Amino acid sequence: MFTGIIEELGKVQRIIRGGKEQRISISCKRILEDIHIGDSIAVNGVCLTVVEYSGSSFTADVMNETFSRSSLGKLTSGSIVNLERAMAANGRFGGHIVSGHIDGTGTIKKIRKDDNAVWFEIDTDNSILEGIVEKGSIAIDGISLTIAAVDRNSFKVSIIPHTLNMTVLGVRKIGDKVNLENDVVGKYIRKSLEFLNGDDSRTHHDNGTKDDIWNQLRLMG
């Protein structure tokens, strides 16, 4: 699990895309201070597993599915990426719950400066927009951000200078593709409501009844 608080920017050293081997190697510093084979690292919000590391970089396997369904397929040697290690049990929860399993991608439609902040408007699919609420949370390239506005085709976030300086948003341009992950709490609530509104024949199964789900939703607020 991650929190969407980016630890450092890494640089892609090389990407191997072949029939038998698909890997990405990324140079970095802070991430390497406490790294082990099998560790989870979020790369632009995508959870990858460390298979090799040295004093200056780490390497992760990447599936075809991941390349095709995320913006990782657009990366090249020299690309800058957001990096975050999985949250330690004794760590601070600075952002929100981020799984590293993205829901899809969006495209930057507009970038507008507003005094010391910068507004980003991002187009995306309805399947993602349906899970977005104003003032709710979303992970953009693994960055925990707050939704400032949402309409039928896009949503907006307002970025402070610190976030621009410490993440890949500082180098993003109109037309760039970004990885998106909706708030996991909202996804669970949405799934529960879909079940509650479903066929009565589905009211009893091994996971409990509709009354059980209503009680869980009440406990969540």
Image (tube, grey):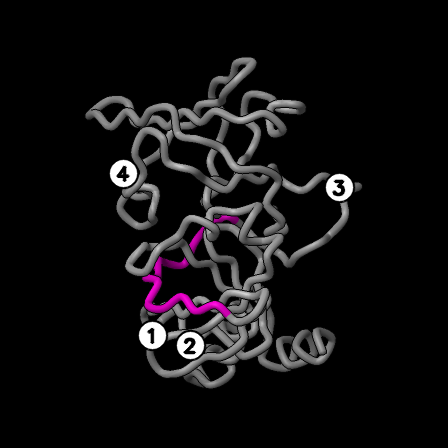
Q: CA distance from mark 2 to mark 1?
A: 6 Å
Determine whether, in the image, residue 35 is placed left or right of residue 128.
right
Q: Amino acid at mark 2?
A: Glu
Q: Amino acid at mark 4?
A: Asn
Position of 210 relative to 167 (above/below): below
- List the residue tagged with mark 3: 89
Kind of residue at badge 1: Asn
Label 4 to label 2: alpha-carbon separation: 27 Å
Q: Is residue 19 magenta?
A: no
Task: Check disc 4 and report the residue beneath it.
Answer: 64
Cα–Cα gap, marks 3 and 4: 31 Å
Tell me which numbered mark, 3 or 2, is placed earlier along the sequence.
3
Q: Residue at x 36, y 58 (%)?
A: 104
Q: In the visual, does 32 lie left or right of 196? A: right
Left or right side of 69 for 219: right
The residue at which mark 2 appears reads as: 130
- What secondary structure is marked by label 4? helix
- Disc 1 to disc 4, how far (Cα)? 24 Å
Give the farthest residue toward the left: 19
Looking at this rendering, what residue extends furthest in the right direction?
90
Is the Cβ of the residue at disc 2 closer than 8 Å to that at disc 1? yes
- Work out whether 117 lies above or below 144: below
Magenta part of the protein: which range?
100-113
Q: Evaluate if marks 3 and 4 touch, with contact meaning CB atoms under 8 Å apart.
A: no
Q: Are marks 1 and 4 in contact (CB under 8 Å)?
A: no
The residue where tag 1 is placed is 126
Q: Do residues under tags 3 and 2 come within 8 Å of each other at their CB atoms? A: no
